[in-house]
Amino acid sequence: MLELKNIRKEFDGTTILKDISLDIHQGEVVVLVGPSGCGKSTLLRCINGLEHIQSGEIYLKGDLISNQVKNMHLVRQKIGMVFQSYDLFPHMTILDNIILGPVKSQHRDKKEVIREAEELLKRVGLQDKRDAYPRQLSGGQKQRVAIVRALCMQPEIMLFDEVTAALDPEMVREVLDVMLELAKEGSTMVIVTHEMQFARAVADRVVFIDQGEIIEESSPAQFFSCPTTERAQKFLNIFEFETVKGTEQNENKRFKG
Ligand SMILES: Nc1ncnc2c1ncn2[C@@H]1O[C@H](COP(=O)(O)OP(=O)(O)OP(=O)(O)O)[C@@H](O)[C@H]1O
C-alpha cells in the first residue's frame, strides 16, 4: 500500500535520512520508534509531501507520490496526518473545522459530510461538542477532533506524529484509546510515539530508527522483549529508566486488556 524506496533526506547538506526502505501493507499499524532527533518526524513529513527528498521514491498504492508538485494536494487528501499541535481554526465550530476539507477540497456533498462528521464525533465520544469552539475543549478533546478531521477526508493511510506529546498525562489515554480503536478496525497507520507501552499494544510492526537509518524492524513482542541490536537495547534501557523515574508506576498495566 505504501512503499518507501531508498529515501535520502538532507537538511542544509546534512543527511538526516539515509537510504530508508519500508513497505507498509493495507491494514497494518507500523510504529516508528527511536531516539530524539533520529528522523522519525522527518520521515512522516516526507511521506506526506511536506518535505522534498534528495533521492528515492515513495509510492502509494502503486502511484509515485514523492516530490510531486502539481498533484500534491490530491496526494495529501489520501494521507491523513495528525500532529502534536491540533491546528484547529479557533473561529470555527468543531463541526465546521471537520467538514471544511471534505467540502471545500474534495467537493463532497455537505449533508453527507456532516452525517459522517457526526458519526465520527460519536465514535470518539464528542457528539455533544459539535457546535462548540476549540477554546471550549480540553487538549485531549481537541486532539480527538483533529483525528476526526483527518478521518473525515477518508484517507488511505493515517500518519500520527507524537500526537500525545503536548497533552497532560490524564488526557493521553483518551487519545491513545481512539487510535487503538482505529487499529482494531483495520486502518492503515504509521505512528511516531515515545509511549512505549502504547507502541507495544498497537503495533503490528515496530521499526527502530537511529541516526536516520532503520536499524531493526520486528514484531512488538520481539522488539520489546529481546531486540536483536545493541542500539535498540540501549534505547529501550534508557526508556525504561525514564519510565521508572517517572511517576507512572502503573505504566506497564496501562494498555493491557
Ligand atoms: N527544517 C529543518 N531544517 C534543518 N534541520 C531539521 C529540520 N527539521 C528537522 N531537522 C533535523 O533533522 C533531524 C531529525 O529531526 P526529526 O524531528 O525528524 O527527529 P525525531 O526523531 O522526530 O525527533 P523527536 O523524537 O525529538 O521528535 C534533527 O537533527 C533535526 O534537528
Image: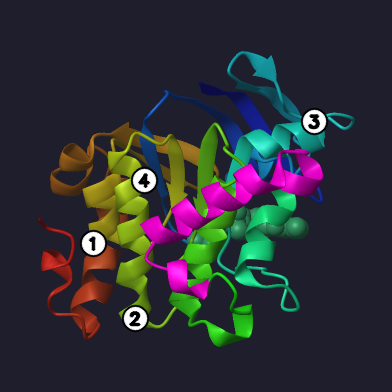
Q: Residues within 10 Å of mark 2 (few under 14, many from 20)?
A: few
Region of the chain picked out in magenta, as a range: 102-129
Tell me the kind of residue under disc 1: Asn
Read off the residue under disc 1. 237
- The image shows residue 141, relative to residue 115, as above or below, that is below
Check disc 3 and report the residue beneath it: 67
Amino acid identity at mark 3:
Asn
Q: At 40% across and 60% down in the image, what residue appears?
A: 122
- Mark 1 touches mark 3? (CB < 8 Å): no
Residue that carries the numbered disc 4 in the rendered image: 182
The numbered dot on residue 169 is 2
Residue 89 part of the magenta segment: no
Q: Name the N-terminal-most of marks 2 and 1.
A: 2
Secondary element type, mark 2: helix
Mark closer to the chain start, 4 or 2: 2
The verdict on label 3 being within 8 Å of ligand 1 is no
Amino acid under disc 2: Pro
From mark 1 to mark 3, how far is it between C-alphas? 37 Å
| Quarter where residue 185 is shown | top left
Rendering colour mode: rainbow
